Each structure stands twice: as structure tokens, then as C-alpha cells.
Image (tube, rainbow, N blue to C red):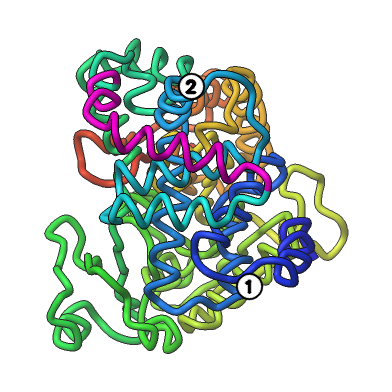
Amino acid sequence: MSGAFVALKSFSMSMPANPRSLCLRALLEWEKGRTFADEILHELTERFKPDPSSRAFLTELFYGVLRNLRKLDFWIADLRSGDLDAQTQSLLRMGLYQIFHMRVPEHAAVFETVSLAKRSGGLVNAVLRRAVRERVRLEETMIAAPLAIQASQPDFLLERWIRQFGAEDARRLCEWNNTPAETFFRANGLKTDRAALLLQNEEAEALETHASMLKLRRIPPEWISEGLGYAQDPSTLMAPDLLDPQAGDRVLDACAAPGGKTTYLAEKMQNRGRIVACEIFESRSQRLRQNVSRVGASVARVYTLDFLLEPEAGSPLSEGLFDRILLDVPCTNTGVLRRRVDVRWRLTEEDFIRMPVQQAAMVRRAVPLLKPGGILVYSTCSLEPEENEGVVDTVRNQYPEMELEEVQRKLPFRDGIDGAFAARFRKRS
């Protein structure tokens, strides 16, 4: 049982399960720094099962506060000097987000937020009412504030992006990161096709950029339960397409959970051959198995193992070489910050030193597992050159037998989808 779940279990006996109270608890749990936002939200909704409208309100409020954390704290500091306890700070963030960013009547935003305060109701009421009175002035102060505050980004991240992309594209990237993610769905070619799904849902929109992708406001639950496809961003299909596995291949998906790429590989292989799908944590392996089973990807076998360790006897990694290897490595996730809304607050400058070392180690482990003539695709959802081009240069310098054939990159502000990087290598015979 996760720490978040234990905390939420005790919470259920002390507070009502309305969306604002759930959001307050979620923010307090997030402040502890042990659990990511998506896991906290998942635990909340699984335990309390809010109705669709309450769930939507909770999601928008929780993620919206996290996206705009720095902006909200800037306003709080303007409205009230001095230190605040975690609950009062969270309540003020919630109230200000409702006032400035949600279609909530101002009086309701103030009243409902104050009603959650235990000891600081008077302070919360005073600050939020002042914010309502001085709304125009506060909006003007934000216009004059530095971009890092306007866009609610850490200074060091914004500085990196300005150096890499230039000021205007860095601004566009920040705007992208603060935009709620669209909903995309890949039709599962093992069971159906996009044309059939389009006939079932008039709101669905076919994407010209990929033959199997749809964009829609809400995925019908039966599409998920019946395994008719997989909810994933179009950028996640780039690396499997570059790998281009063939029916009958022996394929290694070294970092496979939660399964979007694994199941797409199975579709491309027409469920013929074998996919060895690895994941280090059993909890993630269970989710991977569920997704593989749901979509009918019978060619995939899921194993819980540490890819960086030498394989033990009986390991699928010691049973022979692979025709193709997908190495979708752990990374800083800077290309998917609109989906991983709190990652920006978890990252440090040291991560951009640490991650490339781990990523290069995974390549070093993978190269000996590849057949001569085989294909390896290295991929990330990072925008950072240390994790992308830097690791590619390391591979080319350390492994002369690995020939770089192609590099592809997706940039959110240019391509309109999540950021991603992929490099295709062929092992010389």
C-alpha cells in the first residue's frame, strides 16, 4: 500500500469527499514530496469515486494549481506578507486559481474555499476577498512580472530552453506546458481500425499525421475495456515506427511499462514473433500485463527485472540475441510537462548530469544483446541535448559497430504534440 493511499484512507474518515476538499488533501500530500501528482489523483479517484463532473472539477483544480504554482505564490506574496502553514498556502492557491482561471463565481470560490479552513478561515477569507477587489491590479502585476513567474516555470529550466531554442520558442514551450493535454487514442489494429471507431463516435477527429490516431474529448469506456485501442500521444508512436519490427522478429522492449509502445509493436508485428517486455518494478509490470492482455497482444511476454544487471540463469535476456531493441529510457520528461504537470517542480540541475550517465549505461547493456545487422532505437521524451544528441554521440564514439541511420525529433511548439527524440542504429555485421 502506497504512502499516499495510507494518508488518503485516514483522510476519508475526517473530511467530506467533495472535489475541493479532495483537492486540498491532494495538494497537502503532494507537498510531502514523496508521490507524483498523477499517482495521488489516481488514488483519490479510485477510493472516493467522484461523479464525472466532480472528478473533472477536481482534476482541473489540482493540476491547474500545480501548473500555476509560481504565479499563484507571487500573488499570495503580494496580498499577504509573512510565512503561511501548508494548509493555508494550499487553500489560498486553490481560491486564487478558481478566481482567476476557472469559470467559478467569485463569491462561490471564496465561500467554498473558506469553508475548508480549520483555524485560518479569517485569513483566507480576507486574502481572497482582497484578491477579488484588486483583481485588475493583480493581473497588471503579472503582465510586468518575469516570464518564469508568468509561465510558472523554474528559472533554471527556462534559462536552458532560451539557450537552446531562443526566447520566443521558449515562451511558446512554456505556454504549451501550461495547456491541459488533449486526448488522443490509437486504434488497435489487432481488433479494429480507425474507420470503424470513427463511425462509433461523431466527435472523434482523425489525425492526418498518423493513420491509427484519433483526437476526441472523451474516450468511450467500452473502447478501453474491450481493448479497441490505447490512449497515448502521437509522439509515442515515433520510436516504434522507427524501429519498424517485422512479423516473426524477436524484439526487446527494455523499459516497457505502461505498454503503449509494446502493444503498438505487437500490432506492427501482426502478433507474430516474440516481444520480451521488461520492467523493473512489479507494480508497473502488473499494469503492463493488464494492458498487453486487454488489447490482445499475445506476442508480448512481460518480465520484472532490472535491465542493467547481468541476467541470471533462465532470464529471457540470456536466451539469444534480438533482431530489434527498443530502448525507451527513463529521462527528465521535459517533453511531456503538460501531462506530467508537477515534474517541473521535482527536477534539479543535477538530473541533467545524472540521467545521461544512466541512459548511456542502458545502451551499453543493450548493444551486446543485438544481433549483427539488427536495429536498436534509443528514445526519450526529453527535450534536452544531454539526454538526446549527447547520448547518441557517446554511442557513436564507444561502439563503432553501431551505425547511426536516422534521428527524429518532435518539439511541442513546432509539431503540436508532446516532445520526443529517437535515434535508429544498425549493428554492422
Q: Which of marks 1 and 2 is in front?
A: 2
> Which residue is labeled 2 in the image?
77
Can you see residue 150?
Answer: yes
| Percent of width and height locating residue 190 | 37, 82
Q: Residue at 87%, 60% (x, y): give it.
A: 313
For label 2, count other residues whose C-alpha is less than 10 Å away and answer few (under 14), some (14-19) or many (20+): few
| Percent of width and height locating residue 357 | 65, 25
Q: Do the residues labelled 1 and 2 touch (CB within 8 Å)?
A: no
Image vertical order of residue 12 relative to residue 251, above or below: below
Mark carried by residue 409: none
Q: Residue at 45%, 63% (x, y): give it.
A: 260
**As shown in the figure, which amino acid type bears the numbered disc 1?**
Arg
The quadrant where residue 356 appears = top right
Tell me where the magenta segment starts and ends, as one range: 119-141
> Which residue is labeled 1 in the image?
301
Element class at badge 2? helix
| Residue 127 within the magenta-colored segment of the rendering | yes
| Residue 242 within the magenta-colored segment of the rendering | no
C-alpha separation, residue under disc 1 versus residue under disc 2: 53 Å
The quadrant where residue 425 appears = top left
Can you see residue 422?
Answer: no
**As shown in the figure, which amino acid type bears the numbered disc 2?**
Ala
Q: Which of 190 and 36 is in front in this view?
A: 36
Q: Nearer the viewer, residue 102 or 40?
A: 102
The quadrant where residue 149 appears = top left
